Every structure is written in structure tokens, then in C-alpha cells.
Image: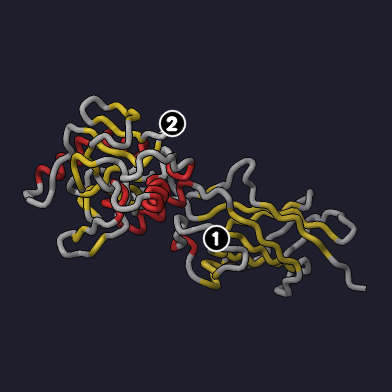
């Protein structure tokens, strides 16, 4: 009677994913993976050759295969039934491990096992890779930019305006419009009815703006940002602008020097530096007012929706 086997598989997240590195000057090119192999009686399969195939799936547990590899010679379990492999150091069957765009996840690891040591993979399991090592992200950024440096930076003229925030990889962030969309305008034409929590996020300006637009009957600061379209030197139309949340305005103020330096030095009549004025945020106050940011004194504050302030649109990339 053929004996069945089971396998307990887990990416070692509790202690971190281990990265291998040839020299101190090279970026990591693999990560350690461990699995405990047991038989049908739940006994450890010790000191045993095991056939393994590893796939990195993109998007879902049944997503496309971004990378796949096998191993020759076969990996062996140790005295405790523990099998250890280096994903990325096997024999590639599909694509190339360093080419994986780790920023474009989520990613899942699919393991296929043949306890007899062959390629009859009778045991499979899939688990989400919940923690992608920063060094692998950095390697992806190096591949994308060709230099190891991040591709975007605060103060860059890009995407219809000026970048004022980037994430740690420099691949995503926030852009402010190169002009004030409007000055001396009320927050909304509906001033006596509270929208509620859907417009009170400190950081999600897009969600706030959607809620404001849904309530307004004719015009609001969020409407003006939503309908703003910028053509950036003929490279494309950008129509996904929105009124920033209060924390996004705070980030914009912190980047004011870099943004204004870019806007003041490009000799473009279609740009205007950030002003020493009050800018509306899309964050509604819990009491019914709305939050603005004072670009005079670097201070946020609540005020009536009927007050007049300027607006600067933002968009994400």
C-alpha cells in the first residue's frame, strides 16, 4: 500500500525572511524558505531527499506565475524533518527571480512536493508572502532606474505638477498642481449639513472629495479640483486631481521649499509658487466646519465652510 505524506510549509516570517548575498556590494538575490515534511502518521520524514518545485504567484493564490524553479540535486530534510531551500537559487523554469517586481504585489508562494524525490508533485500548498524584504524592493528600484537610485524625488516636475511626497522606494507618491486652482472660495455651497465620517479622513483626500462632490449641488472646492485637467508640456492629460486631506496639506507645506524652487525656476508662465495664504483641505470638521492649512504660520485649523480660502489640487502616482 502506497504511503501518503503531508508537508507543513511556512515562510519564516516570525524571524524574518532571510536574504542571501554574495558580497557586501551586491543586492540580495534569494530568500530562504523552510518546510517541515511529515508522513501520513504525522511522523517527521527525516534525512530524506525531496523533490520540490516553487512558484511565485502574482495577485492571488491562483494568480499568474511570476517565477518558477526546481532543484537539482534535490534538497534533503534534516534530523528534525526540516527542509531548507533558497528561493532564487534553483533552476528557473519560468522567468527570472531578480526580475520580479515586488512593488506590484501581493505575491504568493506555491510549493509542490514529491516526498519520493521525483517530479510527481502530490503535495501542494500556497501561502501569501506577507512581508517582502526591503532589500528586494530596493533591487527592483535599481533595476527600474538602472542606477540604484530612486526614480522620483520631492521637487521633481512630473505628472502635471510637482512631486511633494514620495514613498521609501521613490516609485509612488503625491503631486500638487502647478497653480492654485482657485482663490477666495468657500469650501462648499452646502454649509449647514454635516457630511459625516466619509468626508472626515485626515489622510484620504480622494475619499473626502468624493463625499463632498456627492453632497454639493453646484460647486465646491472639491468639484473644482475634480474638474481640473492639466496638460504637462504635451506629455498627457491628468484628470484625477482631488482636494487634499489635511495631513496631505501638511506634507505639502513641509515640501514648500522644494516645490517653490521648482516652480520659480522653470520660467513657465503657467506655474505659480505656493502662496503665503490659507488653503482648503477636504477634511470636514466633526462639528460641521472644515479644516484649512495656514501657509503663513504652518498651522492647521478648523473654520466655517463659508470662509474664503485658496485651493491647490493634488493627485497620486
Q: Residue at horizontal 13%, vertical 48%?
A: 271
How far from the left and from the top, in percent, is residue 105?
Answer: 50, 58
| Mark 1 neighbour class, 10 Å CA radius: few under 14, some 14 to 19, many 20 or more | some
How far from the left and from the top, in percent, is residue 121?
Answer: 72, 71
Asked if residue 233 is positioned above or below residue 24 in the image, the reply reads below
Mark 1 or 2 closer to N-term? 1
* Residue 282 occupies quadrant: top left
Asked if residue 66 is positioned above or below residue 307 in the image, the reply reads below
Q: Nearer the viewer, mark 1 or mark 2?
A: 2
What residue is pinned by disc 1?
89
Which residue occupies the extreme top position in the image?
297
Q: Assign a secondary structure to mark 2.
A: loop
How far from the left and from the top, in percent, is residue 203?
Answer: 41, 41
Q: Assign a secondary structure to mark 1.
A: loop
| Mark 2 neighbour class, 10 Å CA radius: few under 14, some 14 to 19, many 20 or more | few
> How far apart in space, not on screen, are marks 1 and 2 (Cα)?
59 Å
What residue is pinned by disc 2?
287
Give the position of the N terminus as an image quadrant.
bottom right
* Residue 118 occupies quadrant: bottom right
Between 213 and 205, the one nearer to me in the picture: 213
The label number, if any, that marks residue 35 in the structure image: none
Asked if residue 235 is positioned above or below residue 193 in the image, the reply reads below
Amino acid at each position: 500500500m502506497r504511503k501518503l505524506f503531508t508537508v507543513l510549509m511556512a515562510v519564516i516570517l516570525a524571524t524574518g525572511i532571510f536574504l542571501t548575498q554574495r558580497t557586501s556590494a551586491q543586492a540580495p538575490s534569494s530568500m530562504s524558505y523552510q518546510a517541515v515534511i511529515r508522513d501520513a502518521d504525522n511522523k517527521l520524514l527525516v534525512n530524506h531527499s525531496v523533490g520540490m518545485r516553487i512558484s511565485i504567484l502574482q495577485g492571488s493564490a491562483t494568480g499568474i506565475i511570476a517565477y518558477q524553479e526546481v532543484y537539482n540535486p534535490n534538497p534533503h530534510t534534516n534530523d528534525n524533518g526540516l527542509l531548507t531551500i533558497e528561493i532564487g537559487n534553483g533552476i528557473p523554469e519560468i522567468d527570472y527571480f531578480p526580475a520580479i517586481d515586488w512593488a506590484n504585489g501581493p505575491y504568493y508562494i506555491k510549493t509542490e512536493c514529491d516526498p519520493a524525490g521525483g517530479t510527481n508533485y502530490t503535495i501542494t500548498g500556497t501561502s501569501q508572502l506577507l512581508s517582502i524584504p526591503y532589500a528586494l524592493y530596493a533591487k527592483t528600484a535599481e533595476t527600474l532606474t538602472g542606477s540604484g537610485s530612486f526614480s522620483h524625488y520631492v521637487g521633481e516636475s512630473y505628472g502635471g505638477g510637482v512631486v511633494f511626497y514620495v514613498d521609501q522606494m521613490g516609485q509612488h507618491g503625491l503631486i500638487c498642481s502647478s497653480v492654485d486652482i482657485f482663490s477666495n472660495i468657500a469650501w462648499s455651497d452646502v454649509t449647514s449639513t454635516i457630511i459625516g465620517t466619509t468626508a472626515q479622513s485626515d489622510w484620504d483626500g480622494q475619499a473626502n472629495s468624493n463625499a463632498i462632490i456627492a453632497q454639493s449641488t453646484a460647486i465646491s472646492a472639491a468639484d473644482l479640483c475634480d474638474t481640473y485637467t492639466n496638460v504637462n508640456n504635451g506629455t498627457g492629460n491628468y484628470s484625477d486631481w482631488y482636494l487634499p486631506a489635511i495631513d496631505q496639506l501638511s506634507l505639502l507645506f513641509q515640501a514648500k521649499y522644494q516645490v517653490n524652487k521648482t516652480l520659480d525656476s522653470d520660467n513657465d508662465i503657467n506655474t505659480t509658487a505656493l502662496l503665503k495664504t490659507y488653503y482648503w483641505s477636504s477634511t470636514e470638521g466633526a462639528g460641521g466646519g472644515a479644516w484649512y492649512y495656514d501657509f503663513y504660520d504652518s498651522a492647521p485649523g478648523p473654520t466655517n465652510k463659508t470662509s474664503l480660502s485658496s485651493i491647490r489640487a493634488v493627485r497620486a502616482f
